Structures are given as structure tokens and as C-alpha cells.
Image (cartoon, rainbow, N blue to C red):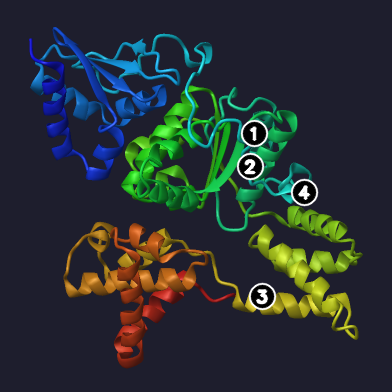
């Protein structure tokens, strides 16, 4: 029988050649070989969480490596080191294993006492990061959001126990995605104060992951932190780009969902329109319910204005509110901004009536208003104009026409889409980085100032995206 230490060292040598150094150092160096009986290798891992993660993230690597070193009947068994250093043997999965196998544990997690202490987590109260003003009472209901509010109420009554898990809320800017998601979180916290609720943006999760990855022994703490959450709300999940951060989130998602924890996501587009996301993540976004938020109709806009004026303690004539509701039709955020501007200007321009001020403010806003533009719309317009396919536009082709079309698409996205980062534009248009997008925008700007034909290209496509008001 081969020595168990020699066998595991050979396994580590192979695994070290496959994985990134940081992954290898974080997840495999802490593992210690204990014994080898027949084809069963027993190794010691720091915690049950540690075991769950390596089985979900590196199962294929482990399976192939053990087969190669021990043989086709290889099995892996874990001994978990508890706080008191008393091992708990947990049968590992046999090798080979079926595709996408369930994690095998001795007893259900809810029935097994948790003897593990994660640094920085024990008896720590987590700030949910929810804004009190984003409650259900301040959310105006209409046809545009009725389904979301109804489902949100059901989730708040029984988080993690409804069919709406995960809840995926999507829609354009300013339609109330963040408000609805946080309202659910606030309602849950009021009904179940002991539950751990956390609101975070997709970009924040990605940044936290990168920070943890670059600090020794912090990645396990980072993942353990998220796996302790009862209700996880991720806003703007379309910004969760990058293979590493998506892999980490995939494992957090699986752990929380399997343990009946509530997941709520918001996005500026439907799951089917999310590009540069792993297919396994996209499939999980579709497990629960996807709820679109539409533009508010006139009656909803008017109710929103009345409610906002009431909260601000300002009496505004109905004819003024009706005028604003008829003019500002895009979203709740612009409606609120118009009303706040009206209140502010009314304290300065005392010689003008509310209606006169409202007319001036809305004329200014509507004069600058741009038709809603998305990255998809820009791509389609550019492809139509230059008579090229979308695959060609997003390819790595260096043909002059394709390169120019790609650069124009990036330029238009940056100039016509609000709150759209360079990184997002680059990721959506050919998988480029933010520096490439910045260079493209600079190149287009320079060519427009020196080449009339090129300038006409850009102007024509912009006209396709922003048709003149009738």
C-alpha cells in the first residue's frame, strides 16, 4: 500500500499545475493527508464550509486527479477539524461521480450542530444597509409594478419559503427596482428581526471578492460571511462581471438556496439578455420568478407626485401636479427630480406661480431628454447601419469596417446611456476592458472633428437611436 502522504503530495503536485497559484494556496495547502485504506484516501480540512466549497468548485479537478494517482475506484473521505480539534468524519463522494452530483453529508445541515467558528463572524450584528425611506408605504402601486409589490409582500411574510426564490426584478433606470428590493428587505426585518438581511450591489460584491482574494486567508472568511446571510439582496447584478467573482457568487447562491435562504436580485435587463455571465448562473436566476417593472402610467405618476408633495409637507395645486404628470413620462426618478426642483425654485422665484415654474422646469428637462437607449439597441443600430452581423461586431476581427463600427458603438453607449460604466460597455461589446473603451471613444471623437464622412456615420446612427420629437 502506498504511503498516504506520498499519494497526497502527488495529488497536490498535479492540482498545483492545473489551478491558479492563489486558488491552490487558499484551498489545497491547508488540507492534510491522514490515511489511505485501499482506494479510500482520508484528508483533514479546516471546516465543513471548506469541504463544501472545494467539492462544489473543484470537484472535477479532484475526481480526475484521484483517478490518475490512486486508480478508477478512488474515493475521498474528509475529516473535519472542529474548534476542539475533535475530527468528524464526513463521507466524501466516490470517484467517479455522476454529473452535477448533490453534496453528500451525514445529516441535514439544519439538524447538525455547527461547531465551527469563522473569524470575525461570531456574534456579530450585520448592518442590512437598507434605507428607511425605501419602505412599502412610500412605494406607489400601479400597473407597472403591481406584480412586484404583490410578490414582495408574499416573500416578506415567508422569506425563503415561497416559490419566488430567487426573485429577479428587472427594468430600466428609475423604475423603482432598488426601492422594491429594499422594501422587501425592510418588511422582512420588521417581521423577523433576528434574520440576517444584507443589501449589496453587484459591483460591491465583485470588489469585496477581489480584495479578499488578494489578502492571505481572507477568501474563506469572505465566502463564510455571505453564507451566513438569511436574505441576500443584490442590486444591479449585471455588474457582477469576472469569472472569479461569478464562481464565488455561484457557490454562495447554491449554499443559500439549498438552505432555504431568500435571494433577491435587480438588473437593468432580463436574465435572457445578460451577456458575459456563466450559463450555470443564468439558469439559476431563472429558477424562481422574474418580474419586469414598466414605465408608470399617468394615474400612477400623478399619485406618486401627490404622495411625494405630502411627504415634503408642501401644498401644490392639482393642476400643477397634473401638468408635470402629463409631461414627464419616463420614470419615477425624473418625476421626483422635477418636483424637488419645483419646490426649490419656488422658494427663490417668488414672483412666479407654481405652474409657470413647472412649465419652465419640464421644458428644460424634456428638451434635454433622450429616448431610452440600451447597449443592445446601440449594437442593433450600428449593425443595421453598416450592414454587418452582431457576431461580427462582437468578434475579434481587425477589419477596418468592423473596428470602426465597434468603436462607434462604444462611443454612443458612453454618450447616450446614463450610469453605464466603461467596464460594462467593454464587457458587453466584445469583452474589452475599460481602457479599450476609453481609447475607442477618444478615437471616434478625433475622427468626427477631422472627417466629415465619419461624423455623418455617427450622426446618422444617433438619429436612429434618438428620433426627433413630433
According to the image, label 1 marks what residue? 151
Q: Nearer the viewer, residue 385 or 209?
A: 209
Tell me if residue 282 can be seen: no
According to the image, label 2 marks what residue? 128
Q: Earlier in the sequence, mark 3 or mark 4?
A: 4
| Cα separation between marks 2 and 1 | 21 Å
Q: Earlier in the sequence, mark 2 or mark 4?
A: 2
Q: Earlier in the sequence, mark 3 or mark 1?
A: 1
Q: Quadrant of residue 219?
A: top left
- Report x, y in % for residue 145: 66, 45
Q: Nearer the viewer, residue 260 or 118?
A: 118
- Is the C terminus in the top left, top right, bottom left or bottom right quadrant? bottom right
Q: Quadrant of residue 15?
A: top left
Circle nearer the viewer, 3 or 2: 2
Q: Are marks 3 and 1 in contact (CB under 8 Å)?
A: no
Q: Earlier in the sequence, mark 1 or mark 4?
A: 4
| Cα separation between marks 3 and 2 | 35 Å
According to the image, label 4 marks what residue? 138
Q: Earlier in the sequence, mark 3 or mark 2?
A: 2
Amino acid at each position: 500500500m502506498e504511503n498516504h502522504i506520498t499519494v497526497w503530495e502527488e495529488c497536490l503536485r498535479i492540482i498545483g499545475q492545473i489551478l491558479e497559484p492563489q486558488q491552490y494556496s487558499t484551498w489545497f495547502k491547508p488540507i492534510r493527508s491522514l490515511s489511505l485504506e485501499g482506494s479510500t484516501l482520508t484528508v483533514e480540512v479546516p471546516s465543513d464550509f471548506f469541504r463544501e466549497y472545494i467539492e462544489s468548485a473543484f470537484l472535477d479537478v479532484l475526481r480526475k486527479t484521484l483517478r490518475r494517482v490512486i486508480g478508477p475506484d478512488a474515493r475521498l473521505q474528509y475529516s473535519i477539524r472542529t474548534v476542539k480539534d475533535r475530527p468528524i468524519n464526513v463521507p466524501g463522494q466516490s470517484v467517479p461521480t455522476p454529473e452535477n452530483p448533490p453534496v453528500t453529508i451525514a445529516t441535514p445541515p439544519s439538524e447538525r450542530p455547527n461547531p465551527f467558528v469563522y473569524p470575525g463572524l461570531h456574534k456579530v450584528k450585520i448592518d442590512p444597509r437598507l434605507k428607511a425611506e425605501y419602505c412599502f408605504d412610500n412605494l406607489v402601486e400601479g400597473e407597472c409594478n403591481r406584480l412586484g409589490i404583490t410578490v414582495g409582500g408574499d416573500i416578506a411574510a415567508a422569506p425563503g419559503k415561497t416559490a419566488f426564490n430567487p426573485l429577479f426584478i428587472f427594468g430600466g433606470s428609475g423604475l423603482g427596482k432598488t426601492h422594491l428590493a429594499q422594501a422587501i428587505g425592510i418588511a422582512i426585518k420588521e417581521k423577523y428581526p433576528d434574520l440576517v438581511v444584507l443589501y449589496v450591489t453587484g459591483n460591491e460584491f465583485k470588489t469585496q471578492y477581489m480584495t479578499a482574494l488578494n489578502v492571505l486567508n481572507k477568501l474563506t472568511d469572505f465566502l463564510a460571511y455571505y453564507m451566513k446571510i438569511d436574505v441576500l439582496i443584490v442590486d444591479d447584478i449585471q455588474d457582477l462581471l469576472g469569472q472569479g467573482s461569478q464562481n464565488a457568487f455561484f457557490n454562495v447562491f447554491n449554499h443559500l438556496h439549498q438552505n432555504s435562504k431568500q435571494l433577491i436580485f435587480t438588473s437593468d435587463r432580463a436574465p435572457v439578455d445578460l451577456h458575459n455571465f456563466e450559463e450555470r448562473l443564468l439558469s439559476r436566476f431563472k429558477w424562481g420568478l422574474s418580474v419586469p417593472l414598466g414605465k408608470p402610467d399617468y394615474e400612477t405618476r400623478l399619485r406618486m407626485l401627490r404622495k411625494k408633495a405630502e411627504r415634503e409637507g408642501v401644498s401644490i395645486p392639482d393642476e400643477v401636479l397634473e401638468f408635470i404628470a402629463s409631461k414627464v413620462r419616463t420614470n419615477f426618478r425624473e418625476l421626483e427630480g422635477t418636483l424637488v426642483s419645483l419646490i426649490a425654485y419656488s422658494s427663490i422665484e417668488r414672483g412666479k406661480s407654481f405652474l409657470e415654474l413647472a412649465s419652465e422646469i419640464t421644458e428644460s428637462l424634456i428638451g434635454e431628454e433622450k429616448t431610452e437607449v440600451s447597449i443592445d439597441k446601440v449594437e442593433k443600430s450600428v449593425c443595421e447601419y453598416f450592414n454587418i452581423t452582431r457576431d461580427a461586431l462582437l468578434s475579434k476581427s481587425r477589419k477596418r469596417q468592423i473596428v470602426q463600427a465597434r468603436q462607434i458603438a462604444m462611443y454612443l453607449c458612453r454618450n447616450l446611456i446614463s450610469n453605464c460604466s466603461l467596464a460594462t460597455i467593454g464587457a458587453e461589446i466584445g469583452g474589452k476592458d475599460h481602457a479599450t473603451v476609453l481609447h475607442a471613444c477618444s478615437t471616434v471623437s478625433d475622427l468626427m472633428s477631422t472627417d466629415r464622412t465619419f461624423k455623418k456615420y455617427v450622426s446618422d446612427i444617433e438619429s436612429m437611436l434618438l428620433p426627433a420629437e413630433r
